[in-house]
Amino acid sequence: MKTFTATPSDIEKKWILIDAEGVVLGRLASIIAMRLRGKHKPSFTPHMDMGDNVIVINAEKVQMTGNKRDENVYWHTGYVGGIKSRTKGEILEGKYPERVIMQAVKRMLPGGKLSRQQMTNIRVFAGAEHGMEAQKPEVLDVKAMNKKNTRTA
């Protein structure tokens, strides 16, 4: 028996819709990263882009445990000496709250060309509205997967 290696004709991509309201950021990002890479599929091949397309809504309502919302400080312009400090809470309440989820998912993927290609398969929206109804996405209920996925205050 030979080892199965997927080819581009074997790849079947789906559209997944995830509601981030009330879900813990790290657990959400790990589930999204797994779906983007395609590790949930039995035919996973590490060097191929096998993952699904992921749509995330309600990014501004994502939760964090502990004091991460106020203590995790990050931001850099890309220039030398370009450090500007912003907390995750400030970014979530600001103009682009979807950047917190994008950065968390990006950091959970391995670096390289393939990961940059896989990051093009995610769409994050701050509110509940998204313009992807034509793709007929399947709903993935992250809250129901594990009781630890939601934060109880």
Image (cartoon, rainbow, N blue to C red):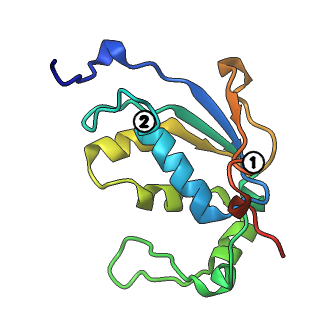
Residue located at (47% from left, 40% from top):
36
Task: Please determine whether, in this image, residue 93 is positioned above or below residue 67.
Answer: above
Q: Please state the horizontal and vertical placement of residue 61, each as a whole percent of the image.
A: 78, 60
Q: Which circle, 2 or 1, is nearer the viewer?
A: 1
Res. 144 mark: 1
Q: Is residue 119 above or below residue 111?
A: above
Q: Nearer the viewer, residue 116 or 18?
A: 18
Position of 122 with respect to 107 (left or right) is right
Which one is nearer the viewer's eye here, 87 or 42? Answer: 42
Secondary structure type for disc 1: loop
Task: Name the residue: 54% across, 47% down.
Answer: 32
Place of residue 7 in the rendered image (x, y in percent of width and height, measured from the top left): 26, 18
The answer to whether the residues at label 2 and label 1 have Cβ atoms under 8 Å apart is: no
Q: Spatial distance from mark 2 to mark 1, Cα to Cα?
A: 21 Å
Q: Residue at x 41, y 39 (%)?
A: 39
Mark 2 or mark 1: whose residue is earlier in sequence: 2
Report the residue that reaches farthest toward the front.
Answer: 1
Q: Locate residue 75, reporting x and y percent.
A: 50, 76
In this image, 104 relative to 70: left or right? left
Identify which residue is drawn at 41% across, 80% down.
Answer: 82
List the residue tagged with mark 2.
Answer: 38
Residue type (three-letter) at the residue carrying disc 2: Gly
Q: Residues within 10 Å of mark 1 (few under 14, many from 20)?
A: few
Disc 2 element? loop
